[in-house]
Structures are given as structure tokens and as C-alpha cells.
Amino acid sequence: MTEAEMVSFYQEHGYLLVKGLISAEEARAYRDECHAVLARLRPSDPTWGSARRIAGGATELRHCHDAQFYSAAFARLMLDPRFTDVAAALMGSENVQLHHTKIFVKPAEKGSPFPMHQDAAHFPHTRHTVGAAIFHFDDAPEEKGCVRVVPGSHRDGPLPHVEEGGWHLPPSRWPLAEAVPIEARAGDVLFLGYLTVHGSGVNRSGEARTTLLVQYRDPEDRPAGDVHRSRGQGMMLRGIDPTAA
């Protein structure tokens, strides 16, 4: 797929899966690094209450914010032109600025789901350039709780979310099961606009699902409120910050 085709697909559907952006060997090394980082940290489970209701029982999620502060491997990956060039093209900006990072591991057999939501509800911006890159460090078939999207939903703009049990869209109107599953292989990267409605299912497989999320923006796209600060926010991943005083 050419760059123009990628941009066209992203603009129409609100997401783009780039196959093999990093090699399977690199993905395995990053997977090991994710699990090593989490093993050194105090366990933290951010599973939403609404997610447990969807799962119908106890589930578990391992995660860590600001991954680049725990391992230089993730700092190198955030600056990799294979990633930043795609992010820049999809935003239509030469400049790519970091918003935040997260490691997510859905443990085998009971990995927590995420109800359908827009990232924009958590950190709204004025120009809506914010995007996410989800790096898959092992295979993510549907049975492992892969990401599910509603293609074209970004064109509806910001939607009202339900605060109870998390910050998500009403499940009756936005059922997880009706969203399109985006199955991925180790080394694939899923790019999502922050207005694109998405969620993910329960990992019912015998293996963990390991991903790194890198959320980014055009530096000229300012936050609409003082929310969701992170230690690394504002770091330039590509280009310059034209707003710097």
C-alpha cells in the first residue's frame, strides 16, 4: 500500500493496520521487555468496572504508563522513523509530538476487555489530530481480545460518554460484539484516530496479549482542558515544535 493509499484509507475509516512495521524478531524482544518491566513494578490492574460486567466474571489486566522511563528500548522505538513517518503522514503534519505511552498485557484466559469508547473523551484537543499507534508484540487473533473498531465512526465527532464504571459509550447503543475485529500478527501496528470508536474483547486464549500504545499529536493541536498529563508529554518524536517560545 502506497503512502497515499494509507492516508486515504485512514481518512475514510479512521484506522489503519500496517502489517509488519517491525520484524517478528523485534516484536519478540519488545514482548520480553514489556514483561520484564511489569515484573519489576508493583502490580496494577486498571480494569474498568464496566469491563468486568461485559466479561461476566473476574478478569485481569497488567499495565504501565510512561514505558520509556522504565526501559530505553521503548524510547528508541518511539523515535523509529518506520513509526513516526506513518504517524506524520496520517496526521498531515511533519511534526509528531508525544502525548503518552502505555504497556498493556491481557493475561491468558482472563484478560480484561475494554468497552467501546473514543480516546477523545479522555483528553480532548482543539484540532482532533491525536492518534494512537498500537504495537503488537505477539499475535492478536480475535480469541485473544484483539482491538475492535467501528469504521467511519470518527466522522461523527466527539460523542457523549458514560462515566459510571469507566469512561465509555453506552453498551446498548455501541455493543462490543458488533464492532469489526482487527486481528493482528506480531510486528503489526494499528493506527487509530482518537475519534474512532473502538474497544477490545476478553483474552480467552492460553497466551497473553502484549501491546504498547503510543499516543501522539501535532504539536500545534492544543488540549481543550488540563487533563491526562504524563511525564513524557510534549517530547518531539519527529520534526519540531513550532509553538515553542
Image: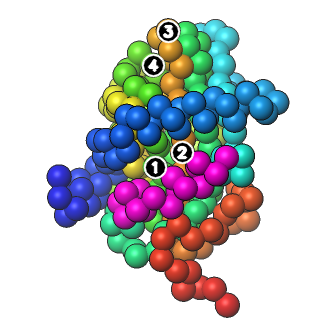
Q: Which residue is mark 1?
A: 133
Check if mark 4's residue and mark 3's residue have beta carbons within 8 Å. Answer: no
Give yes or no for residue 73 being in the magenta stretch.
Answer: yes
Q: Which residues are magenta?
A: 71-86
Q: Is residue 43 left or right of residue 237?
A: right
Above or below, 132 relative to 161? below
Could you say which is closer to the camera, residue 56 or residue 83?
83
**CA–CA distance in space, label 4 to label 3:** 8 Å
Of mark 2 and mark 1, the one earlier in the sequence is: 1
| Relative to 104, 134 lies left or right | left
Q: Which residue is mark 3?
A: 206
Marks 1 and 2: in contact by CB < 8 Å?
Answer: yes
Which color scheme does this rendered protein use?
Answer: rainbow
Query: What residue is shown at x 51% (from left), y 61% (from top)?
Result: 79
Alpha carbons under labels 2 and 1: distance apart? 6 Å
- Quadrant housing residue 231: bottom right
* Amino acid type of the residue that numbered disc 2 sits on in the rendered structure: Leu
Q: Are circles 3 and 1 on residues that touch, CB within 8 Å?
A: no
Q: Secondary structure at mark 3?
A: loop
Give amino acid for label 4: Lys
Q: Which residue is mark 4?
A: 144
Say what secondary structure mark 4 lies in.
Answer: helix
Q: Is the Cβ of the residue at disc 3 closer than 8 Å to that at disc 2? A: no
Residue neighbourhood size for the residue with mark 1, other residues' Cα within 10 Å, grouped as few (<14), some (14–19), many (≥20):
many
Magenta span: predominant SS is: helix
Q: Is residue 221 above or below residue 78?
A: below
Report the side of 31 relative to 27 (left or right). Answer: right
